[in-house]
Image (tube, grey):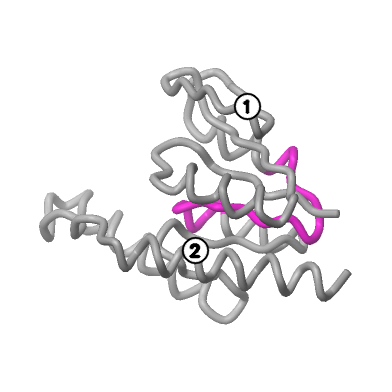
Amino acid sequence: MFNIIIDGDGCPVIEETLQIAEHFSIPVILVSDTSHEFCYENCKIIVVDCGKDSTDFAVLQNVNKNDIVITQDYGLAALVLSKGASAISQNGIKFQDNNILGLLNQRCDARKLRKHNRHFGHSKKRSKQDTIAFENTLVQCILSNKEAM
């Protein structure tokens, strides 16, 4: 069996994930740092100290082949893929070998621009369509994993 692991720092789809996981009887691990407080009964909660990438390291310590990780961090997603697990974003993007390098390059380019004080506005507000796309991608990942086992 596989787990769903949530990078809980700033994740807006925790409740949707828990509902879908419960429907398919899949265990969920929620990882966050001490700046967040969660109280869910139907998942294992791992709390780590605040610190740069501490949550990401905890996710990596707990991920196994065929797990599904929910994260918005491209770097973490790349590491998850290297462990044979799946990674999806809160907006329904499935991170794969064929798109992760481009996403990492975009992140690098954006960091360089920010370093030179070039900002290009804020991220768009989360929409209902983002949540629907996430739910559809999560269900597809679950069904693919179940079929492969």
Q: Position of residue 99 (x, y in %)?
A: 51, 77
What percent of the width, then of the height, locates residue 20? 59, 54
Give SS at disc 1.
Answer: loop
Residue kind at label 2, given as amino acid type? Glu
Type of amino acid at the residue the image marks with label 1: Glu
Query: Residue 115, image x and y in percent?
Result: 22, 49
Give the x, y percent position of residue 65: 81, 58
Residue at image coords 65%, 33%: 42
Q: Which mark is residue 135?
A: 2
Residue 63 lies within the magenta run: yes
Indicate left or right for 124 with 15 as reference.
left
> Is 84 colored magenta in this rendering?
no
Q: Which mark is residue 30?
A: none
Secondary element type, mark 2: helix
Above or below for 131 versus 17: below
Please identify the quadrant where the N terminus is shown: bottom right
In the image as oriented, which residue stretches furthest toward the front?
23
Residue at the image position 38 percent from the left and 60 percent from the top: 131
**Label 2: few (<14), some or many (≥20) within 10 Å?**
many
Instruction: Give me the C-alpha separation between circle 1 and circle 2.
Output: 21 Å
Residue range highlighted in magenta: 60-76
User: 75 or 30: which is nearer to us?
Assistant: 30
Image quadrant where residue 9 sits: top left
Residue 41 circle label: 1
24 or 35, nearer to the observer: 24
